[in-house]
Amino acid sequence: MIREPIYAALWNLAQASAGFVTKSRRAQYLDDVPQGMFPALFMIQKSESPQNVAGLPAVWVFTVEFYIYAHTQGDKTIMPSTILNGLVDAVSNSIAPDAVTGKQTLGGLVQHAWIDGGIDIYEGVLGDQAVAVIPVTIKVNS
């Protein structure tokens, strides 16, 4: 198993999914993203762990989080969530499973990659800004 092509494949799908102005695998805090550089997308590698079954090669489980930042750019007629919702849809759809196989294999690199768990949304208390955190799990043969 070689890790980087797996992470790069997932990143390439997500970062091309919408018109992100800022996109990086090097995360930034929301307050560090300059005005005018929204929407923003970041990917963070969270963990890797093997699942071992006696007599079989290990299956690795990688966890990743996508951080999406949206901003109304001072337009008080727009709710930040209306911008965020379309971005979450775009990223979610970019890593959706294949309609035939029911799996997202990242071009044959992995068994399956999927959104695993709830998508956290932070809106309202952030004024003109909103944030979504999308958890992704990847199963990889060793």
Image (tube, grey):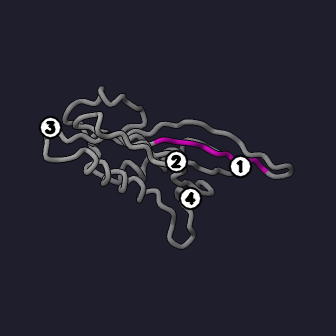
On the image, the x and y values in percent for residue 114 come to: 53, 54
| Disc nearest the viewer among 4 and 3 | 3
For the residues bearing labels 4 and 3, Cβ distance under 8 angstroms: no
Q: Give the range drawn in magenta.
A: 57-65
Q: Which amino acid does label 1 sit on?
A: Val
Tell me the CA gap for discs 2 and 3: 31 Å
Give the residue pinned by disc 2. Answer: 136
Left or right: 108 with respect to 26?
Answer: right
* Up/down of 10 relative to 71, above or below: below
Give the residue pinned by disc 3. Answer: 74
Q: What residue type is labelled 4?
A: Thr
Residue shown at 55% from the left, 36% from the top: 46
| Disc nearest the viewer among 2 and 3 | 3
- In magenta segment, residue 75: no
Give the residue pinned by disc 4. Answer: 105
| Marked residue nearer the N-terminal end (2 or 1) | 1
Q: Which amino acid does label 3 sit on?
A: Gly
Asked which quadrant contains residue 22, the reply is top left
| Marked residue nearer the N-terminal end (4 or 2) | 4
Report crowding for label 3: few under 14, some 14 to 19, many 20 or more residues within 10 A (C-alpha): few
Mark 2: secondary structure: strand
| Disc nearest the viewer among 2 and 1 | 2
Give the residue pinned by disc 1. Answer: 59
Tell me the CA gap for discs 4 and 2: 13 Å
| Disc nearest the viewer among 1 and 3 | 3
* Up/down of 137 relative to 44, above or below: below
| Disc nearest the viewer among 4 and 2 | 2
- In magenta segment, residue 62: yes
Tell me the CA gap for discs 2 and 1: 16 Å
